[in-house]
Image: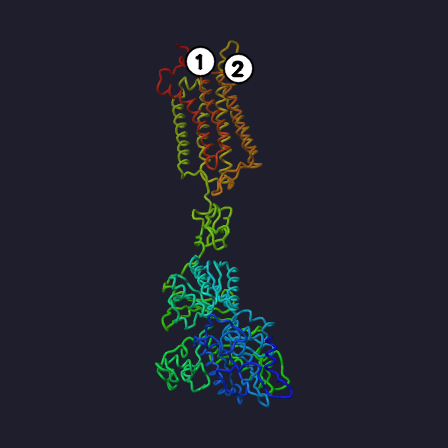
Amino acid sequence: MLLFQLLLMVLHTDAEEPACRLQSHVVRPEFQTDGDLIIGGIFSFRTRQDGYIDSFQSMPEDRPCWDLSFREFQFAQTVIFAVGEINKNPNILSEVSLGYKIYNNCGSMDILRSAMAMVSSHESSTTTAKCTSQTIQAIIGHSGSTPTMGFARTVGQFHIPVISHFATCACLSNRKEFPSFFRTIPSDYYQSRALVQLVKHFGWTWVGAISNANDYGLNGIAMFITAAHEEGVCIEYSAAFESTSPYHDILRIVDIIKHSTSKVIMAFMSHREIKVLVEELYKQNITGLQWIGSDAWITDSSLTESLGHAALIGSVGFTVPRVQIPGLHPFLQEVNPSQFPNSMFLKDFWETTFNCSLSYKAGQRTCNGSEHLKDIKTPFTDVSDLRFTNNVYKAVYAVAHALHNLVTCQQSNTSFSYASCTELSQIQPWQVLRSLQNVNFITPQGESVFFDKNGDSPARYELINLQQVSEGTMKVATIGYYDASLPKHQQFTMNRNQIVWNGGSKRVPVSVCGESCPPGTRKAVQKGKPVCCYDCIPCPPGEISNVTDALNCLKCPVQQWSNTRGDACIAKEVEFLSYEEIMGMLLALFSLIGVFLTILTTLVFYCYRNTPIVRANNSELSFLLLFSLTLCFLCSLTFIGRPSEWSCMLRHTAFGITFVLCISCVLGKTIVVLMAFRATLPGSNVMKWFGPPQQRFSVFALALVQVFICALWLTTSPPFPYENMNYYQEKIILECHLGSAIGFWAILGYIGLLAASCFVLAFLARKLPDKFNEAKFITFSMLIFCAVWITFIPAYVSSPGKFTVAVEIFAILASSYGLLFCIFIPKCYIMLLKPETNNKKQVMGKTK
């Protein structure tokens, strides 16, 4: 239906009456000037449509927009300024004049109607004999994405370029749907990702999202949410509304904000919606919110008019870079109703600005247009923060350069060629469209202007911070930059020191679902909640996390263990029985005491070597036994200290040989006792077979067997230092690995065999009728020896770490002390305390 009406507007009605007759109502431009080539413009100098249903049938007189938009009016005047500047420039379109037709409409249908009027190029409903018209070369506008989408689809069928300065919806980059669309502002695709980088930079992982319920807001917030999920940022809620939405819809969104836990809100909307929302939040006394703004409202000076605008102090957001346009400020100050006497808006603007009436009205001051804008302060003439106005300026220049290339045939970097220069009267919109695709120039401000294959401009933003919002005043500070053309890690830069946060605070707000997990803990997602809602779980022993908000704990290397905080791996404690610890000191002390007592006993025996009690007990074997006991006490010291290759081989072999030597002496003494008793029997001559030479031989022969076992063990599979990490996870047991367990148990078995033989023989001789029967003491000593070593086996197997060594040392010391005390202490007692009994008669049992 729409296309049918359009065709009626551009075709002649019939052949018999070649008059030009419009089939619809007239839409007149707000501002126009003739020229050889015409540029069109569509802006909305008025806003707000509460309760209005937009339709194509609505007449312009019925449009319900009443709020004046100084920014949109400034955009339109910038088009006029740029056209005038180009007409005066001899280097571009020389001898060619540019004209303009600028339409002022709000509401999607009225904006579309204005676009149709430019396509048809008829401005009057009167009938003429001949239809004359000027083709619009390009259309500048509109500021909104949804209206731009509406008329860009339509005029695209006629190949008329549409260049927007403010329509950022990423959907407009679709070349199939919008083949003639260009823009001098980056797509929201880049803004959404820049905003996510901003959110991530400040650690805000739990944010709310609110948008317009139109193409701009819904597409923008959808891309923001997608990018946020990719970066690990969670969205607590997402809602959309329009400034014209029913009041209960706005209350519903305010209620969501009120009961939410996120303190940061991403507002992807226009200045109209943010003002409505802030006013309602102010009425309900909802504060403490940190706003992130899209470029549609973050720098809009009309924010100062809203109730509760102070809540926007501290807002941050990305917007296009700020520039200065020389000459624009005085040009805007010279605007006067006399320049465009047919403009109704300019008349309303003048009366509103100077609070007067250009025609007589009762009770109101009358003015005549002689007033001057430089005498008052108004947002319209404020050029201190030119951003989107510069996009309008660049759009006009882009069209001018495209036309210039067509007229002069001096295209640069073109992908197509022209057979000849295009005549001025023959320039068609499709040619302008193709020329625009290859435009590449530098503005007087030094900014590069070109369009990519989708008609988009380079994505460069300034990060701004609203540091003061008061009645009629808004201070904006640039705190960072974003350039999508750079590598990802270089795209976003900022200066934190200049930021003012919500409420004027200098402290960065916190908006997380779960508190940040310190090093030593990891995130554990709460069941049924987004990934940003988590608990902090301490890393298990042996694992660490050395960064904040770690997702997983890392295992420490084999030889390391986690510290008590769980944030670093430290070398595992190496455990061995050392001289520095109390247990090692005590065992070494008892070993040295045993050596001292043995030496002392040896001295006593040496001093009393000629007494009957020493002579009767085989003094040679006694001294050899004392020497063996000294070695037994000393060999226990080899078990203390850090194991090394030599100490591991020495400790077991020394222990095995010295103990065999010791038991061999005891066994020899036992056999001597038995042989001595047999020798006293009539006709017995047994002692000649076990005299001193035979005794020495038997001792060394028995010891030599142990030496052979030890030598075989050391040559085949000797003991070696070993780091045992299996028993304890948090520490390393440094121990002597047996190498061949058979060798170790063969040594112990041989010792046990000799000890058992000695015990049996001593037990058999315990009741011999001597006054001083040494077999009794040997029996007691062997009983202690066997008991200690039988107990040692299970204790040795079950004891962990250094306690294994301690058990072995204890067994050595206990058995050595048992032999020393049971065999030698009774004799020392006689020699030192009972010398009167140390005679032959007492020893032989001849006295009563």
Query: Would you name the residue on which mark 1 appears?
Result: 770
3D distance between C-alphas at marks 2 and 1: 18 Å
The residue lying furthest to the front in this view is 362
Q: Decide: few, some or many residues near mark 1? Use Cα within 10 Å; few <14, some 14-19, many ≥20.
A: some
Which quarter of the figure has residue 833?
top left
In the rendered view, would you say 474 is above or below 121? above
Amino acid type at circle 2 is: Val
Looking at the picture, how far across and down is residue 631, in whole percent? 45, 30
Q: Residues within 10 Å of mark 2 (few under 14, many from 20)?
A: some
Which circle marks residue 231 in the picture?
A: none
Q: Residue at x 41, y 38 (%)?
A: 579
Q: Is residue 844 shown left or right of residue 171? A: left
Q: Position of residue 95 (x, y in %)?
A: 53, 90
In the image shown, does 156 or 423 lie closer to the viewer?
Answer: 156
Looking at the picture, how far across and down is residue 128, in whole percent? 57, 89
In the rendered image, the quadrant that contains the N terminus is bottom right
Q: Is residue 730 left or right of residue 435?
A: left
Q: Amino acid at mark 1?
A: Asp
Where is residue 153 shown, x and y percent of the image? 58, 74
The secondary structure type at the circle numbered 2 is helix
Residue at screen point 44% across, 47% down: 563
Q: Earlier in the sequence, mark 2 or mark 1?
A: 2
Disc 2 or disc 1, which is closer to the eye? 1
Q: Say above or below: 405 vs 813.
A: below
- The total number of labels drawn is 2
Instruction: Identify which residue, 518 or 580, lies in the foreground.
Output: 518
Foreground pick, 838 / 590: 590
> In the rendered view, how is the structure colored?
rainbow
- Given residues 348 and 519, the one toward you in this image is 348
Name the quadrant of the C terminus: top left
Which quadrant holds residue 173? bottom right
Residue that badge 2 annotates: 686
